[in-house]
Image (cartoon, rainbow, N blue to C red):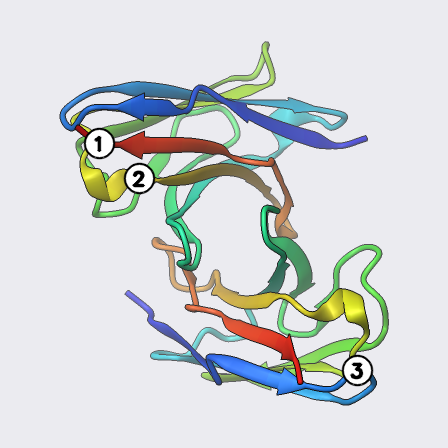
Amino acid sequence: DIVMTQSPATLSVSPGERATLSCRASQRVNYNLAWFQQKPGQPPRLLIYRTSTRATGIPARFSASGSGTEFTLTISSLQSDDFAVYFCLQYDNLPPWTFGQGTKVEIK
Amino acid sequence: EEQLMESGGGLVQPGGSLRLSCAASGFTFSGFWMHWVRQAPGKGPVWVSRINYDGSNTTYADSVKGRFTISRDNAKNTVYLQMNSLRVEDTAIYYCTRDRSTPFDIWGQGTTVTVSS
């Protein structure tokens, strides 16, 4: 099974600053990598799929890149609504579909 | 509006059974694979099971293989998860989500399963 490792576990950022989150796969996942945002009491929300394609309704301040085993999600200018937990998901080598353990973005 | 709504969760003793349901609306249900994903308190999501368009092919996480069964009724726009021989470690919120060219783009609000004596 592919193991997804996210770093850092917690990221403290001030509103308006840039946040960069990382996700590493234990094997190549080609470009089949997605990012989700989750707030307390809510289900995950798809932000990015196919490594860099924003899902419907996702603002342009969210961008993502990567290839092979290394992937990055960038939030260009953090807004109050962006403080949440972010998960990556690989959907290349299946089954199983595997999520990372998450990065919590908190207010500095 | 495209929606998924889970139901059927509850408190059950170890070794017991539950059947979860997920009702879809607002989209062509038969055009999507469907998945169950669970999330234990304070943990990341974990994929549980997947069913293809017509129910002819299913896959399971190793942790639930032989105990859980996924099925669907396209006439009722509903996917099910039959959970038998439940263990304490199955305690989680269970979500259903859909999959086609865009993976996991819509999720239900989840249903809580608690396995405890």
Disc 2 vs disc 1: Cβ atoms closer than 8 Å?
Answer: yes
Q: Which mark is residue B91?
A: 2
Q: Position of residue A74 (x, y in %)?
A: 70, 83
Residue at the image point whose x is 70% and y is 31% from the top: B3
Q: Quadrant of the C terminus of chain A?
A: bottom right
What amino acid type is highlighted by mark number 2? Thr
In terms of image quadrants, where is residue B8?
A: top left
| Residue B114 % position (x, y) | 32, 32
Any mark on residue B103, and which?
Answer: none
Indicate which label's residue lies in the foreground, 2 or 3.
3
Q: Secondary structure at mark 3?
A: loop
Decide which of B16, B41 is in the foreground and name it. B41
Amino acid under disc 3 = Pro
The alpha-carbon separation of the residues under discs 2 and 1 comes to 8 Å
Vertical position of residue B110 compared to residue B83: above or below: below
Q: Residues within 10 Å of mark 1 (few under 14, many from 20)?
A: some
Residue matched to label 1: B116
Q: Which mark is residue A15?
A: 3
Would you identify the image quadrant in which residue B80 lies? top left
Q: CA distance from mark 2 to mark 3?
A: 36 Å
Q: Circle 1 — which element?
A: loop
